[in-house]
Every structure is written in structure tokens, then in C-alpha cells.
Image (spheres, grey):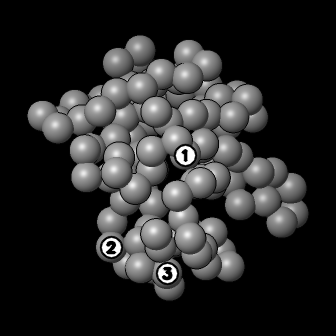
Amino acid sequence: MLFVSDIAKQRIEEVFKKENYSEDYFVRVSVKGGGCSGLSYDLKFDNKMEADDQTFEDKGIKLVTDLRSFLYVVNTTLDFSEGLNGKGFYFENPNASRTCACGESFSL
């Protein structure tokens, strides 16, 4: 399962409205090699499903990830931080044994 915080839900809904995304759009979460800790997150708004996609819904937000990425992000929460030191969207991943200072990469 993937989760979304209340503030991330609100921010996603704002983005969807601002960008005029139709109801078939969703949040795609994936993991790729790279970053200071070895793996990095990738988040985008998408409307095209792939054959190995895993679909979840939390708080009315549809979250999609490919099967390989899901192994790294199972039980992860998408969150959002505002303010001067805010990161924007970020991930609270209970599987990560190490994260970099910027929070954009991790390792297991």
C-alpha cells in the first residue's frame, strides 16, 4: 500500500485543478538508481497505465507505481512541506535505512 498525508492530498488536488487535469490523471511514484544514497524517488502526474503498474488509493488520491519500484516504497507516505525550509513533496519511507540530507535519495 502507498499512502498520502492530508496536506499532500490538498496540494495534489490544487495542482490537478490548476493544471486542468482530467479525472484519469493520477500520481505516479517510482524509484530509480542514483542520488547520494543510491536510489532516488521520482514523482509525476500521469494518465497512462503500464502493464506492471500497481494501483492504490488513499484519501481519494490514486497512486500508481511499477512493480519494481513498489518493492522499495511499500507502506511509504507521500507528504508535503511548506514554508521557507519546505521541501515540497517528499516521502516518508519506513523501509529506508539511510536517506541523504536533501531527502531525495535513500538506500535500503
Which comes before the other along the chain, label 1 or label 2? Answer: 2
Q: Please report the residue visible at 83 percent of the width from the left and 66 percent of the height from the top.
A: 85
99, 22: nearer the viewer: 99
Q: Residues within 10 Å of mark 1 (few under 14, many from 20)?
A: some
Whole-angstrom CA distance, mark 1 to mark 3, is 17 Å
Say which residue label 2 marks. Answer: 33
Farthest residue to the left: give it: 51
Res 59 label: none
Residue type indicated by callout 2: Gly
Determine the image quadrant of residue 9.
Answer: top right
Residue type indicated by callout 3: Ser
Q: Secondary structure at mark 1?
A: loop
Task: Check contact, mark 1 vs mark 2: CB within 8 A.
Answer: no
Which comes before the other along the chain, label 1 or label 3? Answer: 3
Residue type indicated by callout 1: Thr
Residue 18 falls left or right of residue 80: left
Farthest residue to the right: give it: 84
Residue 19 image offset from top left, x and y in percent: 51, 31
Q: Please report the residue visible at 70 percent of the width from the left and 46 percent of the height from the top.
A: 80
Q: Secondary structure at mark 3?
A: loop
Image vertical order of residue 22 relative to residue 71, above or below? above
Say which residue label 3 marks. Answer: 37
Q: Secondary structure at mark 2?
A: strand
Image vertical order of residue 107 relative to residue 42, above or below? below
Residue 59 image offset from top left, x and y in percent: 61, 19
Q: Please report the residue visible at 48 percent of the width from the left and 22 percent of the height from the top.
A: 57
Residue 27 falls left or right of residue 5: left
Residue 96 falls left or right of residue 40: right
Q: Nearer the viewer, mark 1 or mark 2?
A: 1
Say which residue label 1 marks. Answer: 76
95, 92: nearer the viewer: 95
Q: Is residue 98 visible?
A: yes
